[in-house]
Amino acid sequence: MTEDSDSPYRAFKEKLCTFADGQHGIRNPFVIAAVDPALEHEVVARLERWARGEGEEPPSIPDDVTVQPIWLDELFPRTDVFKLLLDLGDETEPASIEGTMQDRLADELVQVMVSDVIDREALESPNHVVLLLNLGSLYPFTRASELLDELDRRNVKSTIGIPFPGEVVGGKLNFFGGDSRHYYPAHQIDGKIQEVHLP
């Protein structure tokens, strides 16, 4: 199956390349695309191959642009909040654990990214694309909007892309049936990535 020009999957990658290659117009070069939740892992695997330049999947990444996949589920165990929860073990009420995670996880994930995962020079460059992958694995503890807010607070200049497992409801993104919301300042790709859009 070929990837047509109306595909939100292709549009997502094209917008990332366009922002990384110098397009301006929004405050931060953040791009978000809704993905059928059942396809999240397949889309993530394809984006990883595309980022590494494996295969012929369009669009090609411009020569002066670098792409770095980051798996949020793999970053999670590196946070202090995860270590705290392991230390507390079974002695803590589930509601207390969920509250602690919701209060601290986005902040700590971004802290690990900027201190240990993304090169300092890349943090200052829109030419460096960071793909935040497997967001669904962190539900219900953090949301795309919270990650983008934390990246914005830290003045990260990298181009950020998030494949978002959820639905588009009235022009807003809905994460696993939760509240629908706009993800300002992210550029939202129209439509939802479905199996028919995958090459």
Image (spheres, rainbow, N blue to C red):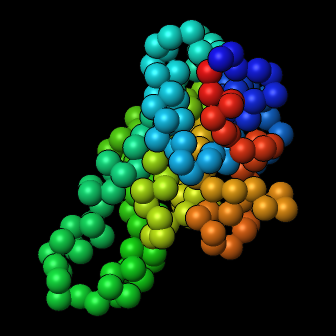
Please tell me how many numbered marks the rendered image carries.
0
- Horizontal side of residue 38 vs 23, given as left or right: left
Where 47 falls versus 73 (above or below)? above
Q: Which part of the image, by quadrant, shows the C terminus?
A: top right
Viewer-side residue, 28 vs 121:
28
The image shows residue 71, relative to residue 11, as above or below, that is below
| Closer to the camera in the image, 33 or 63 | 33
Where is residue 5? Give x, y as percent.
Answer: 80, 22
Residue 123 visible within the image = no
Q: Can residue 194 be spotted in the picture?
A: yes
Q: Position of residue 11 (x, y in %)?
A: 74, 30
Q: Nearer the viewer, residue 171 or 84?
A: 171
In the picture, the quarter occupied by the N terminus is: top right
Q: Measuring 63% from the left and 46% from the top, which residue is drawn there?
A: 35
The x, y position of residue 59, in whole percent, is: 67, 16
Q: Residue at x 39, y 74 (%)?
A: 101
Q: As displayed, is residue 55 above or below residue 96?
A: above
Q: Quadrant of residue 108?
A: bottom left
The spot of residue 13 in percent (x, y) is: 66, 28
Residue at the image position 70 percent from the left and 20 percent from the top: 3
Q: Is residue 161 left or right of residue 188?
A: left
In which quarter of the view is residue 178 placed?
A: bottom right
Please tell me which residue is depicted at 40% across the width and 35% down the height of the picture: 119
